[in-house]
Amino acid sequence: MRVEFEGQFAAKGLALGRARVIYSASFDIEEEPLSHAGIPNEVKRFDEALKVARAELNALTIKVSGALAKDMAEIIEAHAMILDDPEFTDAVVQLIRRETLRAPVALRRQRDLLAAAFEAIEDPYLRARRDDLDHVVARVFAALQRGGAEPERKLNAIDEILVCETIAPADLAALVDQGLKGLVATASSPYSHTAILARSFGIPMLCGARTALNFVHDGDWVLLDSEHGISLINPDAIDLSRFRTHQRDAEKEERRRAKQKVQDARTRDGHALQLYVNAEDTETIAKARRNGAAGVGLFRTEFLFLRQRELPNEDEQFKVYRDAVIAMAGKPVTFRTLDLGADKAFGGPLEVAREENPALGLRGIRLSLQRRHLFTEQVRAILRTSGFGPIRILLPMVSAIEEVREARALIEEAMAQLRHQRVPLADQVPLGVMIEVPAAALISNELARHAEFFAIGSNDLAQYVLAADRNNAQVSEAYDPMHPAFVRLLYLVADSARQAKRPLSICGEIAGDPRYTALLLALGITDFPCT
Amino acid sequence: MHLNALNDVRDTAAKLSRKQLRGRLARILHAGDRAELSAALKQLS
């Protein structure tokens, strides 16, 4: 029987496939009485379940690879943070102890409390973080019920469309690897990490399709048209014919976009744009090059320092950097030197003291100049790649000319040493400055005499100028790149670069967001590294 | 993700005239509040 149901658009696309139905773990638990003597055992069970959940997340981090590895690692990290949050874990233990509840009951009660707090949030993006909480609770709950590790989810066949209440981002990634075609969720939201990931994977997703699970059975044909917010079970001949037409149009549009390479980027009046890619993995870099990217606008070197338990040595760094240069095949790769501070580095292989206010603390070039051996080792690794293709070095968090002078002296010293060791190097390696501290923006005309290029770090510059942390929901309205003060500061930097004939690019959220393209072009910025 | 962003920026830029945008820069820079800035930017797209 043909059934049509509606949902909310979450990720663009059309898909036709067999349904794979997954019912969520039920939280219907009988509240069996617990004696005081049983409390330690319940606390132990909960601790064990937390350990299993953490181990599962760790295993997922190792498994995920490819172009989306970074995005996935961030999502998994967000889930791991919930598992370590005392407001979640301690509260459950307190409920077990104070109210003599069994672990699953205490877990459900704490989830309900936190879920109510999320539901009260007005901002839809932040409210969607409830999805993350549900995924983490479901993981711990499943571990409690099973008493061990979770068996891996597998598709029955390729080309299936998943119909479920919601699915954790990591599980979605695993199913996409197996050939999943689309996703219909009865809950979730377009702002959830699952939806963000579905958009990244390019698979269609419909969310909030509340009645879907009442009608769909495993193996039913499902036609998913997420853009129109509909899904059909057992579509008829007319539906299928319409689907084929839409599919042909979509493929045509895809081919048109693929032909129009990035290097052809121009304004209507013929002004050329340079579009760069920001990436660290060779797969994405090579793909971007094939699409005509002008180079790597920003290679964030800190990812190497955060992924390992030990600090990477010069040779280890060199190999990773060299692969990026080779993948870009003759187009420039801009390496940003270590941009770490206490917020990211604390607890990692780089020993950094905890700071009250890491955003204003020892980070970026300040840290590099304090740990000169580390900076020199990194610079040597970067310089050695200059024999393989054009490269540039970019200094983060610069706030004074003295920092550029000092860094340049260390780079020149490293170059002289490498030449002495007969390492093949480029004659010159341009040195650039990130403009992300208001002080640097205000003296950008002076900095232009000491640096060969500029890159505006729009995220940090906006939050320092507006004194608003973009990750703090309480002040999210104050963090607005469309603030006249921020726009004027951008113009000041663009004007300094223009007068000194220094290439200027911009990175951060506004660079890859088409809503800001007109503003940036009006300001005279034409180099866009897109993240 | 990266390539989609590149494509979106490219498609948007293709509809804009840089000469016209530069011509309206003064109005953007003189905007005193967000509303004035939004109004100036609306004319750009």
Image (spheres, helix red, strand yellow):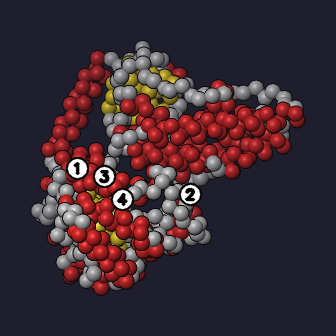
Label 2 belongs to which residue? Answer: A347
On whether disc 2 and disc 4 are found on a single subunit, the reply is yes
- In the image, what residue type sits under mark 2? Gly
Does A376 sit above or below residue A232? below
Q: Which mark is residue A327?
A: 1
**Distance (Cα) linking label 2 and label 1:** 32 Å
Q: Residue at x 23, y 69 (%)?
A: A420
Q: Nearer the viewer, mark 3 or mark 1?
A: 3
Kind of element beneath mark 2: loop
Does the CB distance between marks 3 and 1 fall below 8 Å? no
Which mark sits nearer the N-terminus, 3 or 2? 3
On whether disc 3 and disc 1 are found on a single subunit, the reply is yes
- Say left or right for A274 vs A440: left
| Residue that sits furthest to the right in the current view | A36
Mark 1 crowd level (few <14, some 14–19, many ≥20, 10 Å Cα): many
Numbered disc 3: what chain? Answer: A
Task: Point out residue B24 in the picture as x, y percentages from the top left corner.
Answer: 24, 74
Q: Nearer the viewer, mark 1 or mark 4?
A: 4
- In the image, what residue type sits under mark 3? Lys
Numbered disc 2: what chain? Answer: A
Task: Point out residue A240 in the picture as x, y percentages from the top left corner.
Answer: 28, 21
Which mark sits nearer the N-terminus, 4 or 3? 4
**Distance (Cα) linking label 1 and label 4:** 20 Å
- In the image, what residue type sits under mark 4? Glu
